[in-house]
Amino acid sequence: MSSVPNSYVLSGEHDPRQWSKWRRWAIAFVIWHSIAPSGIQQQIQDDFRTTESIVTLGVGLYNFATTFGPLIASPLSEIYGRRPVYVTSMVGFTILSLCTALSPSVFILLGCRTLGGFIGSGVFSLYGGSLSDMFNPLERAPVVALFTIMLQGAPTFGPVPASLFGAFVPWRWLMGFIAVWAALLSGLLVLLPETEPSAILKKVAKQHGMPVTPTRGSSKDMSNMWREALFTPVTMLLQEPIVSWTTLYHAFVYGLLFLLLEAYPHVFAALYGMSRQETGLVFLAPWVGNLIGVLFYFVSLKPHLRTRRNQILFESSGKRQISPEERLPGVVIGSLFTPIGMLWFALTARPDIPRLVPILSGIPVGIGMTLMQLSLLNYYIDLYPTRSASVVAANCAVRNLTATVFPSVAVPLYNALGIRDASLALACVSCIGFPMALILLAYGKRLRVQSRWAVQDAVGVPGPVAPLLGQSVVQGYGGTVTSSRTS
């Protein structure tokens, strides 16, 4: 790969953040829908009945495959741009969804589902980079909220239509509908413009006949670049304490959701004799919590963030921007809601208490998960502006891995410990997020100084000239370029 000279800057129509608001929102809307079809796929596995072990295997293989797709798709998007990876991922998902709908045997279906999970999961990890390309920190929050509702709502709201329609809608029709919808989205993704800064700069440089220099001023060959790109998410996960801590806890909370998806039917059927269709409605409680979490973020946390930004700009005479750590109060609050919900469930899931009471415990769980997702995604984008796709990829991979493992231990855990003790154990483990968030809030700036990739404060760090001039250095895989954009 190659890069353009550092003297060339993004401006006007070439800078995604200077595109009109409707254009940026339209692109975000298409990307938002591109992650929607995958959300109910694992529920469709329930409609293909062979044996219980095969159904569980299908869900596990799909989730396991989605662990690896983001690790490859995200760094490739920073080499070749977002658009080619979006299109390839969605077209592949479309073809494999159609093959799944036409599968003559359960084993072919499992193979198509596994490959579909691997190829289609690439879009899940790219949206963070795309939003960072197009929106500054204050503009980004509403767009991130849409993605959060989809990502968090898919596993919580998905069981509702699955349980209601599964009895009379053939699974092949459902997969066929998914394939048609994915095909329409593939067509829309083809029309999307490129948003990755270094990819845009290279294209513009070629159009203007500007010389193209080796990557980052070195003589790296393509194999070295591929090696760097593909291993960057893993490297950041292992070497960046901030990424490691937040990802592991976020993965636990996400896995907890999938554990509850498996445990709820077992618990409510045993305690209250609820049918499968009735237990599907139980998942509306976490989904309502998702919506409340989004509202809380915009009513309380977003105004606080705007106030802090204006205060920092005033105190520094416009020379400093808000720090990434200002995003962490949402993580602190979210880490409290999740154990509260689990404790509520542990103490009220009893035959002598009306079933509505333990059902409502899902609301604080949903609130905590949403605040965690919203705050962490914005935190990652602000903290690693040139590596956000790789960080989100690492986060997605570990989360998908826990989503694969946790459901298999749900029923054995509740059978071994009982409903109360199992829920209490999960509540205790989920409490570790609160001190972790407080540590990051207090010492996050020190950890940033020691990081290879984290953004540094514009004042008091080496090379402050470009940020003070309203420019930022873009360290893409394709080279080092300078972008004249302000956040």
Image (tube, rainbow, N blue to C red):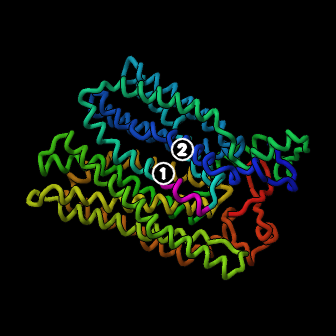
Q: Which residue is mark 2?
A: 29
Look at the numbered disc 2 and give the secondary structure of its residue: helix
Q: Is residue 443 visible?
A: yes
Whether residue 93 is in magenta: the answer is no
The percent coordinates of residue 96 (x first, y second) are 49, 26
As drawn, is 112 to the left or to the right of 279? right
- 11 or 162: nearer the viewer: 11
Instruction: Tell me the crowding category of disc 1: few under 14, some 14 to 19, or many 20 or more residues within 10 angstroms, Cα based.
Output: some
As drawn, is 65 to the left or to the right of 418? right
Instruction: Tell me the crowding category of disc 2: few under 14, some 14 to 19, or many 20 or more residues within 10 angstroms, Cα based.
Output: some
The percent coordinates of residue 334 (x first, y second) are 41, 66
Tell me what residue is drawn at x 58 percent, y 33 percent.
188
Q: Please, what is the three-letter code of the amino acid marked with disc 1?
A: Leu
Tell me what residue is drawn at x 62 percent, y 57 percent.
236
The region drawn magenta spans 137-147
Q: Please, what is the three-letter code of the amino acid marked with disc 2?
A: Phe
Whether residue 145 is in magenta: the answer is yes
Q: What is the quadrant of residue 347 in the picture? A: bottom left
Look at the numbered disc 1 and give the secondary structure of its residue: helix
- 222 or 99: nearer the viewer: 99
Rounded to the nearest whole Å, what is the CA distance between mark 2 and mark 1? 9 Å
Q: Earlier in the sequence, mark 2 or mark 1?
A: 2
Q: Which residue is mark 1?
A: 146
Q: Which mark is residue 292?
A: none
